[in-house]
Amino acid sequence: MPKLFHLSLLLLAVLTQPAVLQAQTTVLHHEMRISLQPDQHQLIVEDTIKLPQSILQSTGGVVHFLLHQGFQPVSATPRVKIVKERNVPPFMGSRMESGTFLDENNLSEYYTVTLPPGSKTFTIQYQGEIYHSLRRQGKEYARGFSETDGIISTDGIYLSGKSFWYPWFNDDLVSFTLDVQLPEEWEIISQGERTRHVHAGGLMKVQWESPEPQEGIYLVGGRLTEYSRTEGAVQTMIFLRTPDKQLASRYLDATGRYLKMYRMLIGPYPYKKFALVENFWETGYGMPSFTLMGSKIMRLPFILYSSYPHEILHNWWGNSVYVDEEEGNWSEGLTTYLADYLIEEQQGRAVEYRRTTLQKYRDYVGDPASGLATKDFPLTEFRSRSSSVTEAVGYGKTLMFFHMLRQQLGDQGFTRALQKFYQTNRFKRASFSDLRAAFSSMTGEDLDTEFSQWINQSGAPVLQIRQAITKPDGKDYRLNAVLEQVQSGPVYKLRVPIAIYLKGQNQAYQTTVAMDQKRLELDLRVSARPLRLDVDPEFDVFRRLDPSEVPPALTLVFGSDHVLVLLPARSPEKIREGYRQLVETWRLSRTNQLEIKLDSEVTGLPSDRTVWLFGWENRFRPKVADGTVRYGVSFTDAGLQMSETRFLRNKHSVVLVAPHPENPHLALAWVATDRVSAMPGLGQKLPHYGQYSYLVFEGDEPKNIAKGQWPVVNSSMSVAVGQSDGYGDGDVAHESRVKLAPRRALIDQP
């Protein structure tokens, strides 16, 4: 989830001192001896549990826990009694790790433990089978993934707190030592530090220790090859299912770079190791001190520069400063801002990233027919991503909130506040209120209004420019304009960047204006004749964009609630049915309205919904041609041409998005291929290319070979300045050469 950031030597010295964990009276400790038998799906556990004093004081020696069905725990401590209860009380269905949790699949059984007076430590023994098959979780347009409640198998091991593989008492944080033995060709990974790793008696024996308080305990493993290095005081580890020294080296190099960068930016890395573990199904999970990635995912070339730093950074945000979800999840947006976004910023693509973020909010959260954000919700209600809507709000809006704080406080004030927040809340649960307290105390600014309007309420401002005009004023010029907030909801307190293009100057005049009313009258004095006024030209303000500010893209198509699909009646039947099956896979994973018809069954395109057109023979294809000719697209009998590049019908699969001819808030999307074998792949891939206006694929996979966004023309936030003295030369060619001031990234990558 910008100027070069510099740390003073004094501040750097303070931040690199090891943090001291304060005594935690509510940390429950597990001392576990574990035997894993993957071929039988079995685990055998002896767990010595030390209860925190806070639990004993409130329960009088009677405590309760949940454990996986069929484990039948017995006490190994004299005078400690364990009784299985019939029903699980509602309060036990509470939060585990990150996310509100309910035992929806009835995996657990409920037990009561009675301890003798003065006792707070006891040992239980249990064993049993955990094997819950992978199940696919559907998302809109087949953007699905697979999950399991827990599995021990010959393919691999995945156990989390949600597996109830260890006794779960309540929401208290836990520390642990795990002594694990399993077949000798296997590796097992958990949080914290590995303190033993030996082969003995035909077994692998491993010990993991986490004195750091955790929200849950993970065990993952398989037949893995280990590669490792040391980065300062941190052991970096890569575990691969197939030996690959070159791949491991790339990830070890990247791990070292990112650990160094985030240490400088935020503070000391909170653990003694970071590990990348290759999983036996496709995942992208981040746990404290390690990440679990699927084989295909970790080999995608862009993962090293997007998802991977994101998961490393989660060890600061979310996996050591935990999320107090009573006020919403701040961690995902902040992590995205300081990982995915920061990497793009370092590569000079920050403006495009912010624009895409705002476009996703407009296209997924809004009602395309009206432009209103009808699916919005306050950030206090965000817990985790479950759809494009929750991603656009929980990730995108939160990301932009932190960006606006950075613009207001400056890079140094912003980073000092983050460091304060990290130092204060390590291994504790923290909320938006704790963030506000850290930022306010470090900067001395009252930020109640900023936090309240962006965190507690839904919606976004909508900006509009009116009456931009200039007149000579001695040797200078006066520019007068009206800036309005035209949203129906409450007024926002904003800091709005403005750029003015001046005649004869190659650098635009830039300033920021404060706005806390619906209408703001601008009166600016500049040294040369103003030709054009741009409001928020680099998308620094979270707001609902006007359709003219962004190109039509697949986000607008996939975000629509009401969609009409028109199949080509004149296509060969196998082509038409291939399209139909592609669309049916989308319909199965959507709850919104998606209607399929032949193009011969309608007389015209409806103006109240997005339309998918399929096929070269679709009789409405000329509407797409009319809508894309402004972008340099032309159609021929053999295919189409974009600028100087020709794409052939018999070789390529093509996707174009054009403005809807009847409604500027909607889109018209066209998909065409003569390869039936490429259609399933297109159906799976297109939802992952949401930001693009055009795509070209080749082959049966199919492989993407071209993608991009149409240029923006005639943005409503960029207006020509009226000349009161009758000056008529707008000098448009000069305006295109004018540059905005360059920005530096928050921190350079080492």
Image: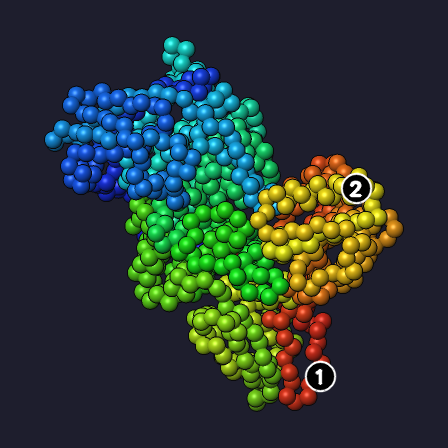
Q: Amino acid at mark 2?
A: Ile
Q: Nearer the viewer, residue 490 or 517?
A: 490
- The picture places residue 307, in percent across and down from the top left corner, at 52, 42
Instruction: Tell me where residue 294 sits by quadrant.
Output: top right
Judging by the rendered image, the residue that carries numbered circle 2 is 575
At a point 24% along the width and 27% down the height, the residue shown is 83
**Residue sitting at 57 percent across and 29 percent down?**
246
Q: Quadrant of residue 471?
A: bottom right
Specify whether 714 is left or right of 133: right
Give left or right: position of 456 versus 579: left
Q: Which mark is residue 629?
A: none
Farthest residue in the right direction?
Answer: 637
| Relative depth, front residue between 475 and 2 | 2
Q: Secondary structure at mark 2?
A: helix
Which one is in front in this view, the residue at disc 1 or the one at disc 2? 2
The spot of residue 364 in percent (x, y) is 57, 56
Q: Residues within 10 Å of mark 2 (few under 14, many from 20)?
A: many
Mark 1 or 2, nearer chain start: 2
Identify the residue at horizontal 48%, vertical 22% (top origin): 153
Q: Amino acid at mark 1?
A: Gly
Residue 608 vs residue 648, the one in the foreground: 608
Q: CA distance from mark 1 to mark 2?
A: 56 Å
- Up-down relation of residue 509 to residue 359 (above or below): below
Residue 405 position, x and y percent, is 42, 61
In the rendered image, residue 652, in percent from the top left (x then y), is placed at 78, 43
Q: Is residue 534 above or below residue 412?
A: below
- Please rate how many residues cluster around mark 1, counting C-alpha atoms within 10 Å: few if below 14, some from 14 to 19, many from 20: few
When the figure is inspected, residue 446 is found, relative to residue 156, above or below; the finding is below
* Residue 548 in sight: yes
353 relative to 445 in the view: left or right: right
Can you name the residue that lies furthest to the front here? 86
Q: Which residue is disc 1 drawn over?
A: 728
